Every structure is written in structure tokens, then in C-alpha cells.
């Protein structure tokens, strides 16, 4: 599909406002503003079909972006959807929440030439949302049912991507998760203004309709050991994510209202889903009218500051020890947060939390960036006599996540982990050191992205299928002898 003409088109068209009325604020960046057909076609038509698709190379799923852009530009949306869904289990989700500025769009040749990227993520979302509206998304109907059964621990994007691919082959799929809802961090971590929960729930219903069985509120380690599950299934996939919040010790860290990010975000997401959340109702996990200080510079920190803005906090400040250029989070998220009124206090770190019972202020100091460390990143160093104090009614710690102690939790001390606590797998087979036990997603990579979890889940599914086939062949051969 190469050799297309390069088109330059005016894409500044009005988009219909499809945001729920209670979330409409002109100064907030929401994902609800949907692409209209003309805009999607015009943007897709900007793709130069350059023949060196860096966008595709830098997409973890190697999505065939040039092809589905061309089909969109030609108003062949159903075909565009077919191409797009062939490599991605959740295109409408990635279109919403991938940090495209670091992946496909950041490597678009037109962006590199200084003309502004083709809005690949928005178009991906538009194609699949349209497919849902038009009824093109077909249920999973395996050509035949197989006898083998697969257990998947974790209903996040890694586990679900594997579940889809394996179910399509006809395996019986059982997904176990300790949460009450399917989706992992897509449901309780990522806020609604970036990823509407109905979009995740629509996929859950689709997977269930395809015959995948979910066992929710089922915690492996509490409700069954890993060995018990190994006995129930022909193969297992561990896709449990990383949930041990990084912490720091400082005077006053135990004061009331110094909160871990996941507690704060989960409460907000549960509220949005219609759950009773007493700690939100009593104000503990609600930022309304409060001075909020978020500590950290990743995407979780950005989600916290932007959630606090939407809860109508009196002020929202973000404290980060490096500078803007060295922030781990998406630059687009930072820009959105700034435009929404978040104040960034760069190159500063907390020293103590001040208050009697509940926190009242954060005492912090300034830092400068010193010599690069072994990874090449400049090490922040304290500037003497640079202390300052910020008012705070809520402090949110968003310092990242590490793996939990899975061998201990699962009652499987022989399950091999890396020195970071992530599960050790062979990248070729995605198998852990336990025969027939595979792993995928954050629990293997460390905290990463939805799109990488999908990629791992799909790779693990291929590897599990190959392993199960080989096992079945060996069993047949042994029986014939
Ligand atoms: C606040 C926040 C915002 C983020 N924003 C983005 C973003 O905008 N874009 C992006 O691409 N990525 C984002 N990420 C990262 C992304 O969500 C993760 O990389 C991705 O969800 C990892 O998928 P996973 O399937 O490996 O794990 P998870 O999504 O974490 O799912 C793991 C599942 O395993 C279950 N589980 C864990 N232990 C057990 C057990 N013992 N028994 C049973 N079940 C268990 C959990 O309940 C969970 O449902 C964000 C992360 C956070 C924390
Ligand atoms: S999956 Fe993510 S990186 Fe790949 S094309 Fe879609 S938005 Fe870009």
C-alpha cells in the first residue's frame, strides 16, 4: 500500500462535544471529544506513506499504521478496523492512553520534519469506536473447542490479551483476579478522564461472551496456592502486575492524609463507577477545597494531580526532584496538567511533613542536577539552605511501584525472580522456571505500559499454544509406544 500522495489539509475543524455534562470544562483536556469522520479522514490523509514506517517500528505492537491510515483516508473504515484489530486486542484503549509522544507519534516522519504528527492514537480510537457503533466487532467464536484448560492469574491488559488469543484457539480459559472488576489498572488505576470505564467494561462483556470465565475476588495465595492452580489447568499465566508502592521515610510520614497514590486513585475510580466509598464521602480521599501536594514525576503523579483538579482542589502542586526534561512521565501529560492549573515545583524534594494529627504542610528543599550516574541520568543533589514550606491538606505519594513477593504470596518459594523481584522468564518462551507456568506484563517488565502488557500477553499466548501443542504431541507419541 505504498506510494500514496502526500496531502496537506487543514484539520482545524470543530469537534462535537460528547463529554458527560458533569465533566465539561473548556480548560480540561478530556478524551471525550471524539473525532468526526472528516477530521479523522483529513488527519489520516496527512500520512505520507513514507515507506520507512518509524511509527510502526516504535509501536510495541508493530501495528500496521500506514495501512489503516490509508484505509481511513479512503473512507474504508471497516477494512481499517480489520487491519487495526489484527495486531491489537484493545485498539480503542491504546488510542486513548498510549503515551504516543514517546511511541508512534513521536517517531512520525512528518513530526520529525516539523509539520506536526499525524494524530495516530486519536484515529486508532476513532476507527475502533466506530467499529463498536457499527457492530463490526465480532464475538470470539473458536472454530473448535479444545479439551485443554488454561488458568490466567490477573485480569489486567496482559492477562486479558493472552485470554483473547488463547480462547480464539479454542482453549478453556479461566481468569482469576483479586479485584471485584475486570481490567486491572485500566479500571482502578487510570482515571476516567483518560479512559472511560465503560470502554473497559464493554471489552469485559465481549470477553465473557466469547466464553472466557472470570473468577473475581479470587486471590492466588489466599484462595488457592499456585500449585493448586497448576493441578487444575494444563498451563498457567501469571500477569499480576506490580503493586508494592515505593515509599520514603521522613518525619511526619505517618500523619493523617499522607496517602499512597493508588488509595487516592482507586477511591476516585470506585466513586466514578458508582460504588460506596466511605473514605471519599468523609473527605479523607477527596481533594475538594483542599491544598494538594503530589510527590513524583511519572504518569501516576500526573493522574493524581489531574484528578485533584477535577475534584476542585483549592490548589494542586507537584514536587519533583529532577527537571521537566528528565521527567519519566509523558510530556503531553505534563503539558495538559499545567494547562489545567497544576503548579510544578521542579528540582525539589520533601524533607518532612508538618502537622499535629493530620498533615498541614510539606517542608521541602531545592536540588540541582549533579554528575550523571551509571545509567547516564544526572543525580539530583541538595542545595544547602534552600528550604521552603508549602501548605498541604493532602499529600499524595506517587513514587512508583515494585513487585510484591510473589514466591512468598503464592506459596511457591521455588518460583524464580530477578533481583528486582520481577518474575524471571525466558523471553523466547515467556515461561518461568516452573514447567508450564508462563508470565507477562508488569510482573515481568516492572511498571510499564498497557501496550507493552498487551504485547507480552499476546507473545505469551503464542508461546503457551506452542508448548501445549508440543506436550499433546509428546503424550500421543508416548501413548502409541
Ligand atoms: C495510576 C496509573 C496510571 C497509568 N496510566 C497509564 C497510561 O496512561 N497509559 C499506559 O499505557 N499505562 C499506564 N499505566 C501503566 C499500566 O496501567 C500498566 O502497565 C498495565 O496495566 C500493566 O498490565 P498488567 O496486566 O501487567 O497488570 P495490571 O493492570 O496491574 O493487572 C494485574 C491484575 O492482577 C491482579 N492480581 C494481582 N495479584 C493477584 C493475586 N495474587 N491473585 C489474583 N489476582 C491478582 C490485580 O488485581 C490486577 O487486576 C498506569 C499505571 C498506573 C498505576
Ligand atoms: S498501540 Fe499505542 S503506540 Fe501503537 S499505534 Fe496505537 S497508540 Fe500508537
Image (cartoon, rainbow, N blue to C red):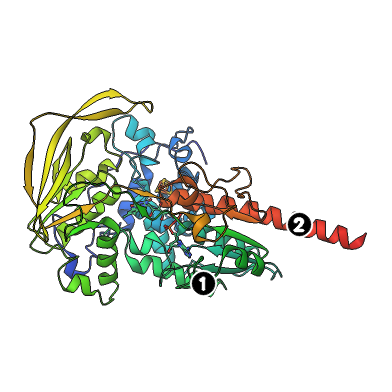
Numbered mark located on residue 300 in the image: none
- Answer above or below: position of 35 versus 205: above
Give residue 200's quadrant in the image.
bottom left
Give residue 319's quadrant in the image.
top left
Q: Which residue is mark 1?
A: 223
Numbered mark located on residue 471 in the image: 2
- Answer above or below: position of 475 versus 341: below
Q: Position of residue 239 (x, y in %)?
A: 50, 57
- Of all residues, the one furthest to the right in this rendering is 481
- Of all residues, the one furthest to the top in this rendering is 371
Viewer-closest of 52 and 348: 348
Q: Position of residue 472 (x, y in %)?
A: 77, 60
Q: Position of residue 297 (x, y in %)?
A: 25, 43
467 vs 121, left or right, is right
Give residue 256's quadrant in the image.
bottom left
Quadrant containing the C terminus is bottom right
Number of numbered markers: 2
Amino acid at each position: 500500500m505504498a506510494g500514496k500522495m502526500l496531502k496537506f489539509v487543514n484539520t482545524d475543524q470543530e469537534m462535537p462535544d460528547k463529554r458527560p455534562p458533569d465533566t465539561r470544562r473548556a480548560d480540561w483536556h478530556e478524551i471525550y471529544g471524539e473525532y468526526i469522520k472528516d477530521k479523522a479522514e483529513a488527519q489520516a490523509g496527512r500520512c505520507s506513506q513514507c515507506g520507512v514506517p518509524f511509527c510502526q517500528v516504535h509501536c510495541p505492537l508493530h501495528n500496521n499504521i500506514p495501512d489503516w491510515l490509508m484505509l481511513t483516508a479512503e473512507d474504508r473504515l471497516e477494512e481499517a478496523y480489520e487491519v487495526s484489530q489484527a495486531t491489537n486486542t484493545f485498539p480503542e484503549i491504546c488510542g486513548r492512553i498510549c503515551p504516543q509522544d514517546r511511541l508512534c507519534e513521536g517517531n512520525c516522519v512528518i513530526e520529525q520534519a516539523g509539520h506536526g504528527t499525524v494524530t495516530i492514537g486519536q484515529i486508532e480510537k476513532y476507527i475502533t469506536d466506530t467499529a463498536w457503533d457499527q457492530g463490526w466487532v465480532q464475538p470470539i467464536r473458536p472454530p473448535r473447542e479444545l479439551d485443554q484448560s488454561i488458568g490466567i492469574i490477573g485480569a489486567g491488559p496482559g492477562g486479558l490479551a493472552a485470554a483473547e488469543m488463547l480462547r480464539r484457539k479454542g482453549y478453556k480459559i479461566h481468569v482469576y483476579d483479586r479485584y471485584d472488576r475486570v481490567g486491572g489498572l485500566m479500571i482502578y488505576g487510570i482515571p476516567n478522564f483518560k479512559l472511560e470505564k465503560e470502554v473497559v467494561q464493554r471489552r469485559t462483556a465481549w470477553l465473557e461472551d466469547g466464553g472466557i470465565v472470570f473468577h473475581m475476588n479470587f486471590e492466588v495465595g489466599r484462595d488457592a496456592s499456585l500449585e493448586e492452580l497448576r493441578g487444575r489447568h494444563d498451563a498457567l499465566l501469571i500477569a499480576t502486575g506490580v503493586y508494592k508502592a515505593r515509599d520514603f521515610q521522613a518525619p511526619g510520614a505517618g500523619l493523617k492524609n499522607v496517602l499512597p497514590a493508588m488509595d487516592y486513585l482507586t477511591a476516585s475510580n470506585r466513586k466514578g463507577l458508582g460504588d460506596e466509598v466511605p473514605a471519599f464521602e468523609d473527605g479523607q480521599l477527596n481533594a475538594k477545597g483542599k491544598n494538594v501536594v503530589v510527590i513524583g514525576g511519572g504518569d501516576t503523579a500526573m493522574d493524581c494531580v489531574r484528578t485533584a483538579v477535577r475534584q476542585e482542589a483549592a490548589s494542586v502542586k507537584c514536587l519533583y526532584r529532577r527537571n521537566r526534561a528528565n521527567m519519566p512521565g509523558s510530556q503531553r501529560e505534563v503539558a495538559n496538567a499545567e494547562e489545567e492549573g497544576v503548579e510544578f515545583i521542579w528540582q525539589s524534594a520533601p524533607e518532612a511533613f508538618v502537622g499535629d494529627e493530620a498533615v498541614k504542610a510539606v517542608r521541602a528543599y531545592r536540588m540541582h542536577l549533579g554528575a550523571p550516574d551509571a545509567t547516564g541520568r544526572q543525580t539530583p543533589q541538595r542545595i544547602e539552605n534552600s528550604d521552603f514550606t508549602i501548605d498541604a491538606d493532602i499529600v499524595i505519594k506517587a513514587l512508583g511501584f515494585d513487585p510484591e513477593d510473589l514466591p512468598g504470596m503464592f506459596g511457591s518459594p521455588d518460583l524464580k525472580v530477578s533481583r528486582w523481584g520481577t518474575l524471571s522468564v525466558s523471553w523466547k518462551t515467556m515461561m518461568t522456571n516452573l514447567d508450564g507456568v508462563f508470565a507477562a506484563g508488569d510482573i515481568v517488565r516492572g511498571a510499564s505500559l498497557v501496550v507493552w502488557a498487551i504485547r507480552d500477553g499476546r507473545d505469551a499466548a503464542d508461546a503457551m499454544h506452542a508448548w501445549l501443542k508440543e506436550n499433546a504431541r509428546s503424550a500421543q507419541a508416548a501413548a502409541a509406544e
